[in-house]
Structures are given as C-alpha cells and as structure tokens.
Amino acid sequence: MTGMTRPPLNRRLAGFGTTIFAEMSALAARTGAINLGQGFPDTDGPEEIREAAVRALRDGRGNQYPPGPGVPELRTAIADHQRRRYGLEYDPDTEVLVTAGATEGIAAALLALVEPGDEVIALEPYYDSYAACVAMAGGTRVPVTLRPHEGSYVLDLDELRAAVTDRTRLILLNTPHNPTGTVLTRAELAAVAELAVERDLLVVTDEVYEHLVFDGAEHVPLATFPGMRERTVTLSSSGKTFSFTGWKVGWAVADAPLIAAVRTAKQYLTYVSAGPFQYAIAEALRLPDAYFDGFRADLRRRRDLLGDGLRAAGFEVYVPRGTYFITTDITPLGEEDAHAFCRSLPERCGVVAIPNSVFYDDPATGRGQVRFTFCKRKEVLDEAVARLQRLAL
Ligand code: PMP
Ligand code: GLN
C-alpha cells in the first residue's frame, strides 16, 4: 500500500462504513447473545416452498442465467398478486421486474431515476441503504422525520409538503415502516399522492412488509391512488413475507417506461439472480390466504410477547402496527445513548438490538431509540425477555 495518498473509498460513500446490521450480528456471534438486531427469522418459510426450490434446482430450472427481467412464471405470479390483493393491473412482460431483493430494487430505482443534484425525500428514521443509494446516485437526501405521538411514530404532512422544492425529484416512501412499525393510513397516503401529483414527483415505495400488518391496520399501495400508477415504482420482496431472506428474490412493478428505466440500471448491477428460487417464489405468491393470515397472527402473538417483556423491563414501547420490529425508548431506564446501550447490552443481559440513532441524519434525534425484532421462535423470545428483566433490577 506504499505511495497511496488518497483513501480508496470515494467521496460519495465516505461515512458509510459497515452496516449496523452486520456490526450487530457480528457482536451477537462474538458474544453468543440472542440476536434481536438484524431482521431475519430463525425458522425457514413453508416446507413446500423450500421443496419447490429443490425441485427447480434438480429439474435444471434457473441453474443458468434466467431472463433479465425475471422468469415469466414469477413475473406472472407477481402481476396476479398485485391484481388479487390490490386491484392493480401490471403487464408481466413490460411492467414487472425481478430484482436481487428489494435492496437491488432500491439501488436500481435510485440510480435510474435520480440526476446528480436532485433531491430525494425519505421518511426518517430510514432504512440504511436509502442514504447510501441516494449518495451513489449523486442525489441529495432530504429527511422528513416521523415523530413519536401518543405511543406511535407519525408523519407530519405539513413537514412533508414543506420539504418539497424545485429540485425534488422523488419521494422514497416506506410503509409499513422499518424501524418504527408505522403503517401509513389511507388518508395520509392520499395526501402524499396529491402532493406528488401537484408537484409532479416520482415516488418509489418500499413495501417489503406489505403482508405484516396487525390490529386491523391496512396496507394500501400508493400506486392505487389517482394519478399515481404512472409515477410510482412499487418495490417488494419475498424475504419477509415468506421467511426466506437469504434467497433475495424481490421485485419492482410500475408503468412500462418506469420499469424500462429501472431495468436499464438493474441489468448492470446483478443482471440476474436467484434462478431456481424465482420458481419457488412464484409458487409462494400463490399460497392460499390461510398462509398469510396464519403468519400474520403468529407474528402478532410474538410482537405482544416481546412488547410486554420490554415494557416490564422498563422500556417505553411504541407498539408497531406492521413489520417485525419494535422501537423502544430507553430513557425511562436512565439510558440516553442508544449506540452505547446496544454495545453494552450483550454483556449486561445477553441480548443484541439495533440503535435507531444510525437511521437519522443527525443521530441526536434518535439518541434514545432502540429497535428489537420479534421474528424469532417463541422460546427464544421468552429467554430474551427473561434476560432483559435484569435491566429492571
Ligand atoms: N427495505 C426495507 C424497509 C427493509 O427492512 C429491508 C430488509 N428486509 C429491505 C428493504 C431489503 O430487502 P431484501 O432483503 O429483499 O433485499
Ligand atoms: N432489513 C433487515 C433489518 O432491517 C436487515 C437487512 C440487512 O442486513 N441488510 O434488520
């Protein structure tokens, strides 16, 4: 490395070190703590879907490069899913694109749609790849902060409206929202839609938790609102819905010109991925309603188990209406620095969590906020809850 005077990482990515999920999963592995940090289930999804992947592998389906936009079986299943669930019509050939998880969908959409200097509005706290992808696209991130109000995080529509400038290109929306668990209501989404139409903005919506909603909350895709189909790129993924996060099968649906744009970027990122798994997810999307209802009901029970345990341990709990995360406030425990708290938690009680402070432009805004996932087996959550009670002593 002699003679290298410039740091290797370029300026756009300076400041983006290791993701918090990798950092905290490594901490869990090192200390043997229960990992309630990174959101991945500790049980695999439906056996018949795993078998469908095995069958595809054995039958030689998808073992070589699949078609760039994804295998036709999956694109058709995605289009059928959007129609059956939401009454949205998309042409599987021109308006559906399979991606390497929603992560690639986010990257491809931003790289395709954002010009250097464009402003991108994102709800804060935001999923960490948003900031990095806006930066890679040369855009400027403009956060609109969800704030705690009567036990949950809410969007201030006036603040959103005020954030739009002549340089705003798109809104990057995430509902159900990671990490807060907020599910935007129909009225809030209608207001976002009106704003997008009025100011001629594109919207990229990240709906990876579309099926994980509780307590009667309803997930409504923004693309269903008037004037939105032609300006919305809807992203989703099979990872959370079917508990196969490692397969990385995601998708984008949008009007043909938007999909053509996103595909242009996508083909130079991975080109294609996950061949055999695409066939298996095509089957998963056709599972009966009982699967989705059962998964949701089961997750809700686990949410309540962890939420009650966190409350008993002294946390303030923001009850999520969607996703598989609970955001808590640690200040009632006499703590104030989420990152320091999360670093010390394995030693103090053998549990790992995620500091939400890293999801804010100014970490001070989320200084007392910590996220726990409840997508783990009941016995693991029971043990984590028992351990967390040490904080209450
Ligand atoms: N968006 C959000 C809000 C997420 O929480 C995640 C992580 N599951 C992703 C995107 C990435 O999804 P995938 O694993 O399909 O790439
Ligand atoms: N989406 C997962 C979470 O929020 C993490 C995915 C990742 O590690 N990139 O925990």
Image (cartoon, helix red, strand yellow):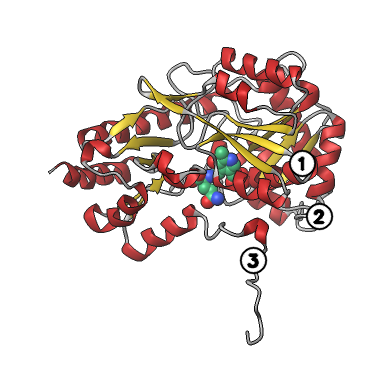
Q: Earlier in the sequence, mark 2 or mark 1?
A: 1
Q: CA distance from mark 2 to mark 1?
A: 16 Å
Asked whether the beta carbons under mark 2 and mark 1 sit within 8 Å of each other, the answer is no
Residue bearing mark 1: 114
Percent x, y of residue 180? 45, 33
**Residue drawn at the location 49% of the way across and 18% of the way down:** 217
Element assignment for label 2: loop
Q: Earlier in the sequence, mark 3 or mark 1?
A: 3
Question: Residue at the bottom extreme?
Answer: 2
Residue bearing mark 3: 9
Residue 189 shows up from this direction? yes
From the Cβ of disc 1, is ligand 1 less than 8 Å away?
A: no
Q: Nearer the viewer, residue 142 or 136?
A: 142
Q: CA distance from mark 2 to mark 3?
A: 21 Å
Q: CA distance from mark 3 to mark 1?
A: 22 Å
Quadrant of res 319: top left
Type of amino acid at the residue the image marks with label 2: Tyr
Dot 1 alpha-carbon crowd within 10 angstroms: few under 14, some 14 to 19, many 20 or more: many
Dot 2 alpha-carbon crowd within 10 angstroms: few under 14, some 14 to 19, many 20 or more: few
